[in-house]
Amino acid sequence: MFKVIRKRDGREVPFDETKITDAIFKAARAVGGEDRQTALELTIEVLKMLKTRYNGQVFGVEDVQDIVEKVLIEAGHARTAKAYILYRDRRTRIREAKGELMDVVEEIIKETDRENANVGNSPSAKMLQIASAASSRYYLTRLLDDNFSAAHSRGDIHIHDLSWYGKTLNCLQLPLDRLLSEGFNNGHGYIRPPKRPNSATALAAIILQSSQNDMFGGQSFPFFDRQMAPFMESADENEVFQAMEALVYNLNSMHSRAGSQVPFSSINLGTDTSEAGRKVTRNLLLAYEAGLGRGENPIFPNIIFRLQKGVNFDPGDPNYDLFKLAVRVASKRLNPTFSFMDSSFNRPYGDQVAYMGCRSRVMANRRGPEVTTGRGNLSFTTINLPRLGIRAERNLPMFYRLLEETVELVVNQLYHRFKVQCKLKVKDLPFVMGQGLYLGSEGLKPEDSIEPAIVNGTLAVGFIGLAEALVALTGYHHGQSADAQALGQEIVDFLRKKVDEAAERFNLNYTLLGTPAEGLSGRFVKLDRKEFGIIPGVTNRDYYTNSFHIPVYYPISSFDKIRLEGPYHKYCNAGHISYVEMASPPEHNPEALLTIVRHMAACDMGYAGVNYPVDFCCGCSLLGVISEATCPRCGSPDIRRVRRITGYLSTVDRFNDSKVRELNDRLVHR
């Protein structure tokens, strides 16, 4: 009856009516039908309608599919029609994903994506981004349930590190002391325990590197001072300093992580009062203060100084001198940041809570011992709070209904990802699982599932844009209104309760995260602006405010910002961080930073830091705030500008466009 049909790309190919029959039969079988004869009869009706409508004209694939849907519905096969429409939609998404992938590859070849400020623009970085784009589209179109995929694509939620969905895990707090004392094998033979400080720190860098290559997120030493202390006892100060300097150099130069990145490394220390432990802390801080070879500000490691009363917080405490040194270094180099062991939610664990530079925190455990070492976050997914606020149209009951539905969606998606991760075998993560780094992996064989280990990890429900959601709901954010502040805490408390309910229901470590968003902060607002238009205070900027933070552009004092953000830390048991902004490094006034840190502790914060510009002229090594495009001393345009982004440091040239605009909007807190 018909000779040719026009494909979507414009080509004309021979018409084959059996493809119509096959498609109808498959749709019928999907809803319990088995009758091919009915499919043949329906095909005849499709052909009749095609003849009537096109009368010898060439028609396309989409035209045929439209008529198939019409015939199925008119013939009373509504369930088969629905199955056919879903199948057609899935095939459309797969086809579009292929086209989008080619567009993404073309852009990446020009310049690397800036979703992660640790990614450079090298050939290997571009290759990682191309692989990441392909992998993400595979998971969206082939593996994820339609409701999860659609919610991510619409911008209701964001599945972080989507390209790694079924390949590995997020992050880990490493058992450095055990690996150094027993030795380890990272793939090419046994590495014996070190005997001197330089060997110990060299192996520490290799351990970070090896673990990083098994995972997609950060790697951390939870108790670096006490973990490293046994290898420093007989060494003098100079030898320990040289070892720590080598560690800092290594962690800024080992471009061994996928995409030519250095490992995302964090180091927690500050509460070991032994002389060897104090020596570790003192000399790592001094090495970081000295900077790199010409005085450049180090990017890694994130140093997190652990504060605790009776240990280092007050004058007379045994490590108070190290706290003062940490403040001095933070006044020049942005790091260390500070974690507070005496906060209401950390205090029950003594000094055992460790953080990562991106803010991740892992402590409580439903399935094993409540420890930090050997545990990490498995994955996290973020809720777009401003979108829910816009959709609610200032109707709070509606907002909470939408929020509850979205939390439930995220909880189920995280469980789906957990079950996918459980299919991984020990041999798939040969260092992390094969060497027993992950709690519960000890004794597992290469072909065993990693499930017995990862039940100790966390599944994090994140959120972004509390400030913009509050504006959408009330007209004010929590920096502007006491009522908005009360509502903000109510919303985050609601989130935490729903997450705790999920932990109880699944008997897994579901936790709530104040999301660290880079590319996401711009992605969400672009989607929302396209759907809802420009809404002042909500979608009128190119980014959403991270987690529960007061917007960076809002004028507020540092003490008020800390006071208002402090109450949110206790809800976010998966991680939290707060900052204040200074105009310049307070290296000549460290007492100001000390006062701020003490106020953070008084406001029940768990983890916090202080931001300011750190600029370095690569021509003459001038270090300071360089406001001009060129160096005021030598005229060089080669200025290295270091800033903090979502917890860790990076150079501004690696920020994506949304984060550059956010950076430019940051106001100094009085």
Image (cartoon, rainbow, N blue to C red):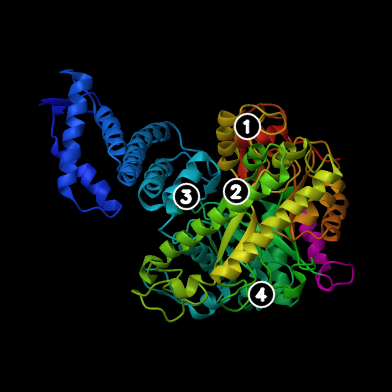
Query: Where 302 falls versus 85 (above or below)?
Result: below
Q: Quadrant of the C terminus?
A: top right
Give the vertical position of 235 relative to 660 (above or below).
Answer: below
For image coordinates 17% across by 18% down, the residue present is 55
Q: Which is closer to the viewer, label 4 or label 1? A: 1
| Residue type marked 4 | Arg
Q: Position of residue 104 (x, y in %)?
A: 40, 35
Q: Amino acid at mark 1?
A: Asp
| Residue bearing the label numbered 1 | 542
Foreground tag (3 vs 4) = 3
Which residue bears the numbered disc 4? Answer: 226
Sequence-first tag of 4 and 1: 4
Q: Is residue 326 magenta?
A: yes
First along the sequence among labels 1 and 3: 3
Q: Find the residue positioned furthest to the right.
A: 315
The N terminus is located in which quarter? top left
Residue where numbered disc 2 is placed: 383
Amino acid type, residue under disc 3 in the picture = Phe
User: Which of the labelled discs sits on residue 148, or is there none?
Assistant: 3
Badge 3 element: helix
Q: Amino acid at mark 2?
A: Ile
Which contiguous range is marked in magenta?
A: 309-330
The crowding category of the residue bearing disc 2, from other C-alpha atoms within 10 Å (few below 14, some 14 to 19, many at least 20), is many
Asked if the stretch drawn in magenta spans residue 619, the answer is no
**Element assignment for label 1:** loop
Relative image position of residue 355 (x, y in whole percent): 66, 62
Q: CA distance from mark 2 to mark 3?
A: 12 Å
